[in-house]
Image (spheres, grey):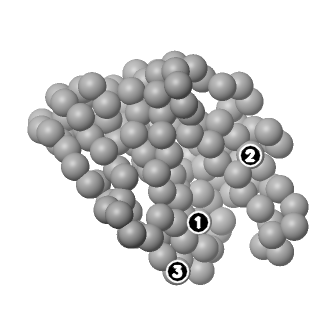
Amino acid sequence: MKAPLQATYGGGITDAFVSVLNPAGRALVYSTYLGGSQNDIGTSIALDGSANAYVTGQTGSSNFPMANAVQGTMGGLNDAFVSEIKSSGSSLLFSTFLGGSLNEDTRPPTGAERGSDRRGRGGREYLRSGNNFID
C-alpha cells in the first residue's frame, strides 16, 4: 500500500482495493484497501476530471467506510456501495450503502465496460440485480 486511506485489511474473505497510477502510468499515486469486517467486492471504477476515483461494489460489512452517506446503514444481507476517493487518496469524499432488505449486486453484465479513464471514456455503472432495492 502507498499513501493508503485504509492501510489494513478489513476482514472477511475479500476487501475491495483501489490503486491509482500517475497519468504516464509509471508511478503509483496511492493504493488502499476499501472494506469492513465482512466480504467487500469492488466491481467498477471510474475517474472524474479531477482524478477522484468513484468505486462501486457489493458489501456485507455493516462497518464499511462511510462519508456523507445517503444511506448510512445496511439495508439487508448485502448492499451495493458507491464511494468517491480524493485524487491524492488522502480522504473519502463520499461513501454510501445502496440497498433494501435483501441482496443488491453491482456487477456489470458480462462483457460490459467496467471502468473509465480520466477523460470519461467508458465508465458505465450498473446495478445489475436487487431484491427490494431501497425499500
Disc 2, SS = strand
> The residue under label 2 is which amino acid type?
Ser
Answer yes or no: do the residues labelled 1 and 2 have beta carbons within 8 Å?
no
Residue position for label 1: 47
- Foreground disc of the pair 1, 2: 2
**Location of residue 18 in the rendering, given as x and y in whole percent from the top left corner:** 64, 48
Residue depicted at x 37% and y 52%: 107
Whether residue 120 is visible to the viewer of this picture, yes or no, is yes
Task: Point out residue 58 in the picture as x, y percentages from the top left corner.
Answer: 39, 40
Q: Residues within 10 Å of mark 1 (few under 14, many from 20)?
A: many
SS at mark 3? Answer: loop
Question: Which quadrant is home to the N terminus?
Answer: top right
Residue wearing tag 3: 121
Give the residue at x 51% y 52%: 55
The quarter of the rendered structure image containing the C terminus is: top left
In front of the other: 36 or 13:
13
- The amino acid type of the residue labelled 1 equals Leu
Q: Position of residue 39 (x, y in %)?
A: 46, 28
> Which numbered disc covers residue 31?
2
What is the spatial separation of the Cα atoms under label 3 and label 2, in whole angstroms? 22 Å
Q: Amino acid at mark 3?
A: Arg
- Give the distance between the C-alpha atoms of the residues marked 3 and 1, in whole angstroms: 10 Å
Q: Can you tell which quarter of the image residue 128 is in?
A: bottom left
